[in-house]
Image (spheres, rainbow, N blue to C red):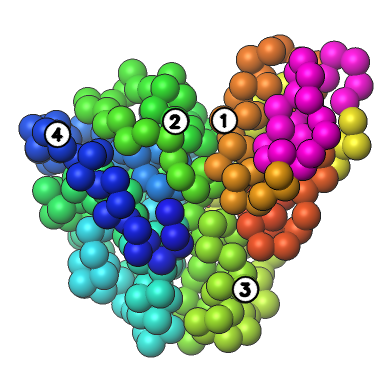
Amino acid sequence: MGVDGSDRRQGAGQLLAGREAEIDAAARALRAGGLVLLPTETVYGLGADAANPAAVTAIFEAKGRPRFNPLIAHVADLETAARIADFDDRAYALAKAFWPGPLTIVAPIKDTAAVCDLARAGLDTVAIRVPGHPVSHAVLEAFGGAVVAPSANRSGRPSPTTYADAVSETGDKAAAALDGGPCAVGLESTVVSVLEGQVRLLRPGAVTRVQLQQIVGPLAEAEDDAKRSPGRLALHYAPDAPVRINARSAQPGEAFLAFGGGASGEGVFNLSPGGDLAEAAANLFAYLRAADRTKPSAIAVAPIPEDGLGEAINDRLRRAAGYIG
Ligand code: TXA
Ligand code: MG
């Protein structure tokens, strides 16, 4: 899927055909305060009505997520987003360039009832995005309002990028679950703040730093990690086995996540034999989980180049390894 979402409708017919009743049931479950497993182009989310504090509480409980970590509000289109958040010219430019798609924009909250205090962890800003996946888009259109949806993993674990992984993480907590196939991007959205005329990169993701700069010019200096993204835990995206990054090879007993040609054999999972970063991103969380299932002493991961999508991949790997909080 292109980050500009231009091919959002590609395959939409197939994914949506004959599913009107399922989509309506999901929208009804949201209205009733239930949780819904939703596919997006980045990762599967666990959604709830953003305006309903009881439903939002249920999300924090289902994930075991700290309450000070605010959620992302998902809406069907830019017009709805601009009613909820205060978008300046730069926020509009970014939204027009990358929505629907894997970019989340943090901006001042305007409609405090549309995304309740609890969902924003009491902040006077809101994180908002228009996802590009046809199934989540159809649910958002049917529902009408904002749906807060964190990644559907239990807190601290790798985000689910397949329906089966999403169901095994939090499916038992959901009133409805929608299968949208494997997530095309495989990494969470890029999070930027657009506040007081400054654009800051809070979480690297599928939309790269260079792509952002092409729209808004140089980014403002990022604040330190604790301040810039409230909920980022010491160990995040972590499988059960310890993760060892920048490894040239595996030790006996370790699984190996390779990148590029050459490596193969038992316990070896090649993120992209051809050395393609988009393919590696799409495979990252599913392969961390697959490696984990072999019950290794550790998961060794080959060095990944830092350019383009590599910045987001390395961010997730450093957190999975417990290097940054
Ligand atoms: O791709 C994604 O973004 C997925 C799919 C489901 O949309 N969602 C996701 O949500 O990754 P979650 O909850 O796992 O991550 C949300 C991130 C957190 O790092 C949180 O701290 C940050 O967004 N965030 C939310 N509201 C914020 C705000 N007002 N200011 C700064 N950071 C915020
Ligand atoms: Mg998450």
User: Does 209 appear above or below 33?
Assistant: below
Q: Secondary structure at mark 4?
A: loop
Say which residue appears at 49% left-offset and 48% top-offset: 185
> Residue 188: image x %, image y %?
51, 49
State the mark number for residue 323.
Answer: none
What whole-number distance in Å separates the C-alpha atoms at marks 3 and 4?
38 Å
Magenta stretch containing residue 261, yes or no?
A: yes
The overriding secondary structure of the stretch rendered in magenta is loop
**Front one among 54 and 132:** 132
Give the residues in magenta: 250-273
Circles 3 and 2 in contact, beta carbons < 8 Å:
no
The residue pinned by badge 2 equals 162
The residue pinned by badge 4 equals 19
The residue pinned by badge 3 equals 210
Q: Say how many tags the image has.
A: 4
Crowdedness near tag 2: few (<14), some (14–19) or many (≥20) residues, C-alpha within 10 Å: many
Circles 2 and 1 in contact, beta carbons < 8 Å:
yes
